[in-house]
Amino acid sequence: RWSPDGKRLTAELGTSQMINEAGDTREGVMTLLLDDAGREIVISGADSVIPGAMNAAWLVDRTTIVYLTEQSQAPAQAPSGPAATPPSSPPSNKLFIVNRVKPLAGGGSALFQGHLFSEVAWSAKQDAGVAIERNKGLTATPRLVALDLAGETLRVLGTLEDYAGGLSISPSGKKVAYWINNEQLEVRDIDAPNRMARVRVAVGTLAWSGDETRALVKRGPALRAGGLAWVALPPLAVVAAGAAPATADAAPQSVLHDLEFRQFDISPDGRSLAVVEPGRRNLLVYPVS
């Protein structure tokens, strides 16, 4: 992931550690810090990786990184080397802590003490984010919350009786989208969370257009190849408390000749579409039309 100024990168790496003589392995993750020339950025008192860190992002101040670690790990401390992470819990049961580190200053700390999240989407230019908050036992109804990373405060946008994934924040940081089930995508205004809309589209992953009037959707699991299609997003409208917005129907418009891709994203300026081919893993870039 690029930093907001395009000068730094975070790269998430998978790790595998042999844990016994039988050859059993333990899978983990770490995040590598780089500048735009490919040089590693060393954290003061440590090295250039943050063990156990995932979904990492540079903030707009260019000195701070926020990232997630699984709740089963100890709260973030000064990274001390590429240590292996504890065994991962099943994806449906994963809970995460939000952390930050300032590489030049060293050390690190957990943010939003006492709060656990199952999913987080960053809006680095606004030093903000949105998240799905859960309790430790996963027994309470999920809450959609807005995160102020600079002030270390959160604001509840609503409770979600149903949530199927795909949390995403718009380029402006003003809207959030997520699937409430396998067929309905909900869009909500972050500043006025009672303004919402729903559109019928199969669950998957999405990227926002630059003007935020449509979304490019790859249906199916995030790391499985699939076709891409534009979906027009309906206008938001005020919805009374306890009510649900009407679900609009949209005719998806396929792109790139119905070819399938493993991963994709739209550039922050909304002008370029990058895709990763399955198998060969080539990265291709096309203009957004």
Image (cartoon, helix red, strand yellow):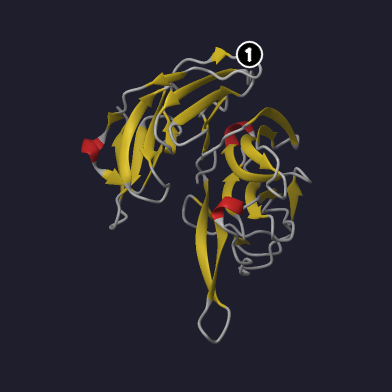
What x and y, as percent, mark residue 148? 70, 33
Q: Residue drawn at (53%, 18%), measured in percent from left and top?
A: 245
**Is 80 situated left or right of 41 in this image?**
right
Q: Residue drawn at (50%, 44%), measured in percent from left and top?
A: 2
Work out which quarter of the rendered image holds the C terminus and state it.
top left
Q: Residue drawn at (62%, 35%), measured in percent from left and top?
A: 129
What x and y, as percent, mark residue 188? 56, 23
Q: Nearer the viewer, residue 190 or 66?
A: 190
Q: Can you say whether 223 is above or below 25 in the image?
A: above
What x and y, as percent, mark residue 269? 43, 30
Tell me the quarter of the picture where residue 229 sits.
Answer: top left
**Is 281 situated left or right of 80 in this image?**
left
Seen as rendered, the residue at the extreme bottom is 21
Q: Can you say whether 251 is above or below 226 in the image?
A: above
- Residue 63 visible from this viewpoint: no
**Is 105 situated left or right of 85 in this image?**
right
Amino acid type of the residue tagged 1 in the rendering: Ala
Q: Nearer the viewer, residue 267 or 245?
A: 245
- Residue 132 visible from this viewpoint: yes
Q: Nearer the viewer, residue 118 or 288?
A: 118
Seen as rendered, the residue at the extreme left is 257
Residue pointed to by mark 1:
240
Q: How many marks?
A: 1
Q: Can you say whether 1 is above or below 273 in the image?
A: below
Tell me the quarter of the picture where residue 174 sits.
Answer: top right
What x and y, as percent, mark residue 128? 64, 34
Q: Residues within 10 Å of mark 1 (few under 14, many from 20)?
A: few
Query: Element type at marker 1?
Result: loop
Q: Residue drawn at (63%, 13%), measured in percent from left and top?
A: 240
